[in-house]
Image (cartoon, helix red, strand yellow):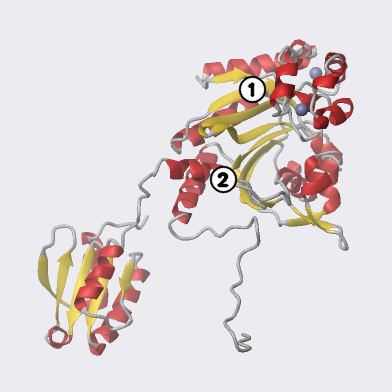
Amino acid sequence: MNFSGGIAVKIKALNGFKDIIPGEVELWLKVEQTARNIFNRFNFSEIRMPILEKTDLFSRSIGEATDIVEKEMYTFVDKQITMRPEATASLLRAYIQHGLYVQKPIQRLFTIGPMFRHERPQKGRLRQFHQMDVEVLGSANPRVDTELMAMGAMLLEELGIDVSLELNSLGCPECRPGFRKTLLTFIDDRRDELCDDCKRRSTSNPLRVLDCKNPRCREQVEEAPSILDHLCGSCGEHFSSVQKGLQDINVVYSLNKFMVRGLDYYTRTTFEFITADLGSQAAVGAGGRYDGLVETLGGPKTPGIGFALGMERLVLLLQQKELETESTGCDMFVAGLGEKAIDFAFPLVHALRQMGLQAAMDHEGRSLKSQMKQANKLQSGYVLIVGESELEQGQAVLRNMETQEQQDVKISDATDTFARSLQEKCTLRIS
Ligand SMILES: [Zn+2]
Ligand SMILES: [Zn+2]
């Protein structure tokens, strides 16, 4: 440390990067635990990929002409490596590299972790943000599309988050070019009314005009043709099956012809989970099919579908509900009074922890009153009060914090027998 005369300057986290501190982290855990539980119910396996990848991976999979690749990636130019801006590309890279398709013809994978985009930080938009990402590789079956959406809906419902599911199809390389042409003709007649972004991108990617947020553009595309009227036979059939599947298991959805994707690799089914509880309509999750992507990345021809949920938004929605986070209270606080008692408490607390109980003590030799305060803060079920004179007589006082009852207990055979009987008294969390 450098104290050259003055007070050292505080170092803060980078703009757009955020700590998740105690008090907040409980909600993150709730989101992650609920998700893991549900992904498990649907037979998904976890996969973890590195954060750094070759830049090519993302420019090839996400597409050169996207905001992400054009201006939002954290790229180390000298090394041609990039911090992942999303998870799908890395997951597919790992899938191909390890030949996971050989082990299992259909892989169901999920991953949870941080992603990085160099956007201007603003409320709700961080440079390091977190996603839960789910992918099914190796099946073109519309039932899988249905199942994925049902899983997302189930997760959000269990978290108590209100969303509506919106659905569209983006067709395939066979039928999309035809629709593109029709749409381009429609847009050409209205080009002068569009925003600059739309004017620029309308020729290269006219579909993007459909999801422009500018109210004037929205008005212009209100009457735009729907891709759903231009699907080829097999895309139409696929989309009907997806919808029938959702109806069969009572997953409510609505069609949204304006939903397109900024990423080039999406085909057929595309969907979003939308909440109205964040001020305006906002997506908490989005996904879709990408039947050509594995091949684009040098793997075998493999259909795929997936979705990602933004964890910051989920946590924000939980915070708004001011959920009482279930705190896992401490089983036993050992209050030692005096040095000898503290010396006795330390191995006892350790033994309790080894038995799977949550135990705590004070190392600083504070007063009984102050230790009882700590025990309360930790929501301890029991407090064992050990004074030096009691210790000499082999006695201690056990206080049930809920009923306020106290009893004298023997501590002669403290650690083992005593801890075991305690284990029965305390709420057990050993599974
Ligand atoms: Zn098609
Ligand atoms: Zn626009």
Mark 1, other Cα within 10 Å: few <14 / some 14–19 / many ≥20: many
**Horizontal and vertical percent position of residue 404:** 13, 62
Residue at mark 2: 311
Q: Nearer the viewer, residue 3 or 109?
A: 3
Q: How many marks?
A: 2
What amino acid does circle 2 point to? Met
Can I make out residue 300 in this image? no
Callout 1 secondary element = strand
Q: Position of residue 285 (x, y in %)?
A: 60, 36
Q: For mark 2, give the secondary structure.
A: helix
Compared to residue 429, the image places residue 274 above or below, namely above
Q: Which mark is residue 289?
A: none
* Residue that numbered label 1 is attached to: 167
Check disc 1 and give the amino acid type: Leu
Image location of residue 26, percent across then percent down = 44, 53
Of the pair 331 and 221, the residue shown nearer to us: 221
Tell whether circle 1 marks a residue whose Cβ is less than 8 angstroms from ligand 1.
no
**Residue 159 position in % (x across, y down):** 45, 39
Q: Is residue 311 above or below residue 365?
A: above
Which residue is at a point 60% across and 87% down the rendered structure image?
3
Q: Quadrant of residue 178?
A: top right
